[in-house]
Image: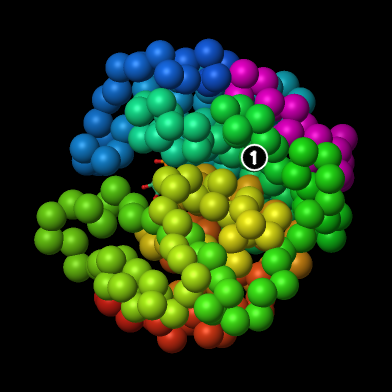
Amino acid sequence: MSDLDLAALTQVALETARTAGQLVLRGWRSKPAVERKLSYADLVTRFDLESEQCIREQLAARTPTIPIVGEEQGGEADERPTWFCDPIDGTVNFAHGHAFFAVSIGLMRAGQPLLGAVVAPALQSEWYGFAGGGAFRNGAACQVSSHESLPDALIATGFSPVMRLSGHPEDNVAACMRVMPQVRDIRRCGSAALDLCLVADGTYDAYWERRLSPWDVAAGAALVIAAGGELSDLRGGPCDPSHGYLLASNARVHAALLPLLARDGAPT
Ligand code: LIP
């Protein structure tokens, strides 16, 4: 299989995410034991570890030449196309029995998102697609919304566990306080992968967050591009998923949002 057969590789990512999704669903609402990682807001369960092992075995078997980077076992990315997998994005939700979590598998080359598959088993929903091939939700083609102005916009964001560490200079709360009066409403649902999918299928008009990891955004970022959306960093520059400062939108509200976000200690 050529390593740039994007349609076939999207199918590999989707089938792998479905299998891991079924494994994770068996643990949902089972009150799994949690371990803290960076902080009380950064958790891991045995289902995160088992899901990643399942993903790695499937990808290694079907695409042996493509390196893998994952949230729990890590990995190195170079200029080659590389899989970025998050075994459970939204682990805090999963651990508390909330349905908003997903298995996310994306392929990126040198920071450029190429394709993605995101499976949310408790929501019985899946999103997949690749740049130039379109984006799909549960088998139906989807695209970003057509809202032109902020008062009509539903916007999502999040608060990375890193920033919750005491004394951290960056503050996404101030940005929220600036955005909230300008838009229809804000959502904080706890999974970057799903927030990006909801921009790609037109549910949200935009989503921003700081200090995300490449496995949180690789798949969803590819779907926003495939669905006709816009991606940048918080100053409107090129978005580098390994840097983790991201604004994704329907492209129509992007310019109006940037001035509200490009402050508060954000390096870029
Ligand atoms: C989560 C992100 C979410 C962020 C959470 C957390 P995880 O990733 O997807 O956007 O707000 O704090 O980082 O840790 O569940 O894979």
Residue 125: image location, x then y, percent: 67, 35
Which quarter is ligand 1 in? top left
In this rendering, does residue 78 appear at all? no
Q: Which of 109 and 252 is in front in this view?
A: 252
Rendered residue at 86%/55% (across/down): 133
Nearer to me, 149 or 250: 149
* Residue 20 colored in magenta in the image: yes
Instruction: Give above or below for 254 relative to 136.
Output: below
Residue 47 left/right relative to 122: left
Q: In which quadrant of the rendered view does residue 186 lie?
A: bottom left
Residue located 48% across and 74% down the image: 183
User: Magenta-highlighted stretch: main secondary structure?
Assistant: helix
The residue under label 1 is which amino acid type? Val
Query: How many other residues sit within 10 Å of disc 1, few (<14), some (14-19) or many (≥20)?
Result: many
User: Percent from the top left, x then y, of residue 96?
Assistant: 35, 28
Q: What stretch is highlighted in magenta?
A: 1-22
Instruction: Write down the residue under mark 1.
Output: 118
Is 211 in the magenta? no
Residue ID at (34%, 53%): 160
The image quarter in which residue 255 lies: bottom right
Quarter of the image for residue 31 reads: top left
Tell me, yes or no, if residue 224 can be seen here.
yes
In the rendered image, residue 66, in percent from the top left (x then y), is placed at 69, 38
Residue farthest to the left, as pictured: 167
Q: Is mark 1 on a helix, strand or loop?
A: strand
Q: In which quarter of the image is the C terminus?
A: bottom left
User: From what the image shows, is residue 244 above or below residue 99?
Assistant: below
In this rendering, the count of numbered labels is 1
Horizontal side of residue 158 vs 53, given as left or right:
left
157 vs 165: above or below? below
Measured along the vertical axis of the image, is residue 167 above or below residue 44?
Answer: below
